[in-house]
Image (cartoon, coloured by chain):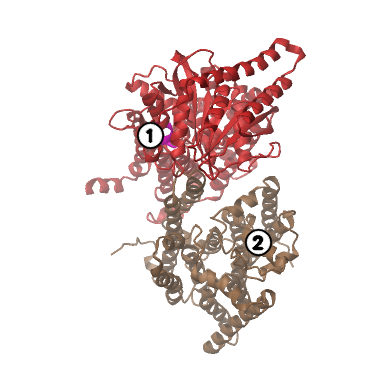
Amino acid sequence: MAVDRRKIAVFGAAFVLRLLLTCFFPSLPDLLTGRVEVSTPVNSFKRLQEGLFLYTGNVSPYDGGVFHQAPLLLPLFALLPNAKSSPLPTAIFYFLVDLLNAHALVNISASGQSVKSKLHSAVRKHVQWDGVSVAAWFLFNPFTIATCLARSTSVFTTSGILFAVSNAVAGNSINAMLALGFASYLSLYPALLFIPLVLLCYDRRSEGPSPPNVGSFIVQQAALLLASVAGLIGLSCLITGSFWEFISATYGFHLLVPDLTPNVGLWWYFFIEMFDSFREFFLGVFWLHLASYVGGLTARFRSQPLFIITSLLGVFAIFKPYSSISDASLFFALLPLYRHLFPLMRYTFFAGSAILYSSLLGPAFYHLWIYAGSGNANFFYAITLVWSLGLSILLADTVFAALRDEWEQEHPEQVGTEVRQV
Amino acid sequence: MPAAIRNLRNNPHLLFVRLPKLLSFICIVVGVVWLLLLPLNEYSRQTYISENALLPGQVHAYFTGSEQNIFRGYKRELEGLLNDGQARGGQKDEAEVTAAVSDKMQSILQAAGLKVATQKYEYTSAGITHQGENTYAIIHAPRGDATEAIVLVAPWITADDKLNLNGVTLALTLARYFKRWSLWSKDIIFLITPDSKTGTQAWIDAYHDMHPASVQPLPLKSGALQGALVIEYPLDHRFQTLHIVYDGVNGQLPNLDLFNTAVAIAGGQMGIGANLQEMWAHDDSYEHRLQTMFRGMTKQGLGYATGAHSSFMPYHIDAITLQTKGEGWEDEMALGRTIESLCRSLNNLLEHLHQSFFFYLLMQSNRFVSIGTYLPSAMLIAGNFTIMAIALWMRTGYYPEKPSANPKNEKAPAEEKAKTNIIAERHLALPLSLVVGLHLLGLVPLWVFNNIFHQYFTTTTYIFVVVDIVLPLLLAAILSNGLGLSKPIIPQQYHLIKSFSLLLLGLSLSTLATLNFSLSFMIGLLCAPLSFVARLRGSAPFRLTISSLGLVLLNLVSPPTVLLGVCWYMGVSVEAVLTQAAFGWDVWGMWTQVVVWCVWWPAWLIGCVLLGSSIF
């Protein structure tokens, strides 16, 4: 096996950077862990610590209503030394998970599925970054670093998703479904990626010598996914003992959104303001809205399943309950795969500026609201709107560029003409 | 209008090069003019009490008569201890005197029926150790449940480094006097600190369990603090007016209601005039209002603690200092009555002060402008950088540079010029890493100026002046010639470097404007030239002359030069200023330096690099 020097350099540099940040600023991880932009009720390391404490004390971790994460994380973290007294092993574990995620990204990029899939071939194939650059964008993204240092458990969901995709682009549908099952088990929402992921697997399989039957393939994969999730839930039952308690504390919590702690998403403020009688209705509407993108994007981008996954991750980063910057960092991780679309995008600078502005103003306004007491909740909420706006512009622009790319492929004579809204 | 737009479309030079410069310039000018308009009656407002519960001056203050004898008695006792120490000079050292005084204060407070406790602390900053012992006592509210408290602070040394004997004595007298009243619904804490810089900080940190290891925890606590008043009476004669100091650390201000209450009580009920910002002869003219506002902005912008009250502000506790000034006929009893009345007002509060403004500029004790009125001026200045950044970004994409202007331009990919409406490919890697790298480089001076010993500050500043002259030229040379380290960069990348740098600057300044308006405004003004400097074109001698001249001018507004200039103008030593700054960083949690070294300095450096690159 050839050793890729650049890859080692990038991975090593990313590791060293994280290590230096933890060593030189020992208070940084705890500071980030406390930030609402990074830690939400469903991925906070602090809450995990609470759950872990109860778990090691032989009490149900869901007692007290603080911990809402998957129970299988508990035995895993129980193996690691106490993060309070010796933070380094836990930190290094997280660094390694980040590197693994980056490795999966390199594999995704190496497959070339983003530029050339079974049914689609981009016009600007030559404009592309190699896997190491894509991994570097992921590893040196401040949002990724912040998530990693804050030890948010979202990174495991991220690995689940990235491994599912990297296995899918390799045509390894069984592993892909197992990984997706893991991600869905942890955070529920990745289950929405099932359809595009099956499409991706199917496209890869059908390029081979013996294309499988569509119907039976889908049923097979669905059964696999269900089996993997069921297996993990079964294991969890062994740990927690009570099935319903853990289901309602984790998936019920994800679905019903009872904790309205501020985060960068759009749900908390809306549900704070709402009269209780409308709550169930709007919960349904919000979830339906989130899920509806799957159908539309899948139908429109049937020929580019990897792009469906990318844009869906963007949608999740904006519209999912309890969204944090780790969701955005996952979306940003997959974006560089579409380097060939960048020349077609029109508002990158504005989207980038909006995201930059909100990531500076967000903490400032949160400070004014919570600590200085001179602002109020609307300050922070306004900035989360700007943040979502920035992400939406970026997402819409990416979708526009992908459509334009398809169109240019169909009409080679029109390349370079200006788009006009009619 | 449509004709004008068509004209712009057909003239990219006007649209991408001239118009942004014009817009940026207009933004700066309007921003400055806006600020200058604020003192006018049309733009500023009369202050008013927003919180009804305060009812300033509605109660009779009973602190008179026989209390004065108590005051004199306490004063004589303390004076005796202090003089005793002075008289015997070398034989009795300072620590012994301090201990004796502290014991005396504790016994006085205990005799008055208060719970007393002490707290030792020690801070080290820039190689100087500050240590001391706070003494404090609590009156438990007869009508309260110890969930809320008011703090009265009397530092032994005032903010102006004078002995505050009368102030401390008054606090002790008030403690005895307040204890006998049954109407308090909030606990009252009397805090006697050794000085105005460290004592309250150590105490308030420990009160919220946020203290470093070198500070002792508090053995005795009360409820949430609702407000704090600092008493300073360093004179040995009667005073004329009260000077109200209100600036907190990092430019945070107390609720305007607290200031208004103090003005209303001092002026309305007691008939003592109230001054602010050391404006002793304020005739309410435009000039004086402007001067008051500028003084307030300077203090806010520098973000240092202006008195013992400043340390309360980060914990969202509104606090002011009352200083006695001038020679008049008001005595300590008048000051005592003012404080009594203020405490009664604070005692009335049903919830934390929140009604009135937290962001304001005062220009007279009864005139202010609120954030909605003044914020646009700093935002316009910050906006000028953003406008320029956006324009430069557009320019790199849509407006091809003329190849004739610069021979290096031919290296730009030729295919992009073929199609005019396709966005040119931008080479982002180098500009992005340069801008990010230089911003990270700002951490070096930040670390240096906060960690070295105080005697090296002056030398280090001069070293940094030299570094600021050499570093931009070095970077410019590397960028334009490569010096074998990298490929020489193309003109588009100069625009991108400037675009990213200005974008970050605009971003940081507009964020900063919401936290500390004055600092954002000052840095914005100092950075204003950066919008207009760029790599020059033209013949070599012309470029050399103009860019050298420009570099000299830019070096005059570099952070270390500005520091030296201001110190020279104010007549203070650089070492004192930087020691104070390092102390602020270490103890008060002041972050003005972060803005200087991680926002202003990198932006300035990049401006110089761009200008310097014209030489090569």
Q: Which residue is mark 1?
A: B28
Identify residue type, mark 2: Glu
Count neighbours of disc 2 (C-alpha within 10 A) and say few if under 14, some if 14 to 19, many if 20 or more. Answer: some
Residue A381 vs B37, above or below: the answer is below
Instruction: State the residue in front, A376 or B426.
Output: A376
Q: In the picture, which chain is brown?
A: A
Q: Start and end of the magenta stretch?
A: B255-260
Residue appearing at x 62%, y 24% in the figure: B462
Q: Which mark is residue A50?
A: 2
Identify residue type, mark 1: Ile
Say whether residue A342 is visible.
Answer: yes
**Residue A393 figure quarter:** bottom left
Instruction: State the residue in front, B237 or A96.
Output: B237
Residue B258 falls inside the magenta stretch: yes
Q: Tell me the quarter of the image containing the C terminus of chain B.
A: top right
x, y percentage for residue B39?
33, 28
The hue in which chain B appears in the rendered picture of the protein: red
Residue B374 vs B194, above or below: the answer is below
Instruction: State the residue in front, B92 or B337.
Output: B337
Residue appearing at x 41%, y 25% in the figure: B266
- Asked which secondary structure carries label 1, the reply is helix
The span from disc 2 to disc 1 (Cα, nearest Å) is 52 Å
Secondary structure that dominates the magenta span: helix
